[in-house]
Image (cartoon, rainbow, N blue to C red):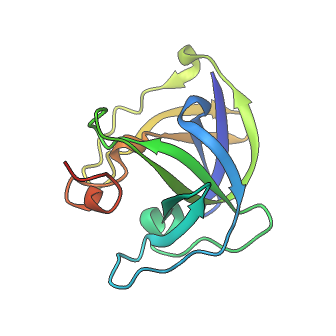
């Protein structure tokens, strides 16, 4: 499996490449009033308004740094309901490398953190650990109203 690597607070994280639509440089976002802090804004992607979540803000409480390697990772977000999905941008830092690993190399942590159900299995390598993200669990049901189309 091919994984896209990125950083949050100098910790490595990974997304399965099949979840990724495209990786874009940071673009100018329109900020929406009264949105949560982790909701970075929206932008026009090929005629579609796409919401962007700041993963650094969401997971660590501080916004992503504006480096040349900071990117917006476009993904299909379904929030646990495959029938409803939308394109969502995930802002992250140091989005510059990929990694090939087999499913057998992913280690189950056997740790469940109620406030962070999006934390998946881990990868162990010579540089340390890489936390895999389960993007369908990034937001609670009540928070998904910002991202998923209404019925």
Count of numbered badges drawn on the protein: 0
Residue at point 57% right, 29% down? 18
Pick the residue in front: 41 or 2. Answer: 41
Pick the residue in front: 94 or 12. Answer: 94
Q: Residue 55 placed where, x, y %?
A: 51, 61
Residue at point 48% right, 80% down? 31
Q: Residue 11 placed where, x, y %?
A: 61, 54
Residue furthest front as drawn: 47
Observer able to see residue 68 = yes
Left or right placement of residue 88 versus residue 112 in this view: right
Residue at point 80% right, 66% down? 68
Q: Residue 29 placed where, x, y %?
A: 58, 74
Left or right placement of residue 32 versus residue 67 in this view: left
Which quadrant would residue 71 be assigned to in this image? bottom right
Observer able to see residue 126 = no
Residue furthest bottom as drawn: 33
Quarter holding the N terminus? top right
Residue furthest right as drawn: 68
**Is 122 situated above or below 27?**
above
Q: Residue 136 placed where, x, y %?
A: 37, 42
Residue at point 33% right, 52% down? 116
Which quadrant would residue 64 be assigned to in this image? bottom right
């Amino acid at each position: 499996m091919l994984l896209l690597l990125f950083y949050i607070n100098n910790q490595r994280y990974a997304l399965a490449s099949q979840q990724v639509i495209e990786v874009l440089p940071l673009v100018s976002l329109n900020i929406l009033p009264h949105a949560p802090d982790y909701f970075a804004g929206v932008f026009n992607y090929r005629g579609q308004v796409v919401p962007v979540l700041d993963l650094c803000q969401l997971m660590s409480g501080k916004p992503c740094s504006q480096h040349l390697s900071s990117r917006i990772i476009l993904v299909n977000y379904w929030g646990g309901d495959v029938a409803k999905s939308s394109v969502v941008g995930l802002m992250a830092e140091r989005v510059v490398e990929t990694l090939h690993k087999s499913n057998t190399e992913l280690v189950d942590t056997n740790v469940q953190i109620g406030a962070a159900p999006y934390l998946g299995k881990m990868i162990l390598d010579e540089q340390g650990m890489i936390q895999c993200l389960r993007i369908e669990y990034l937001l609670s049901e009540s928070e998904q109203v910002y991202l998923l189309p209404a019925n």
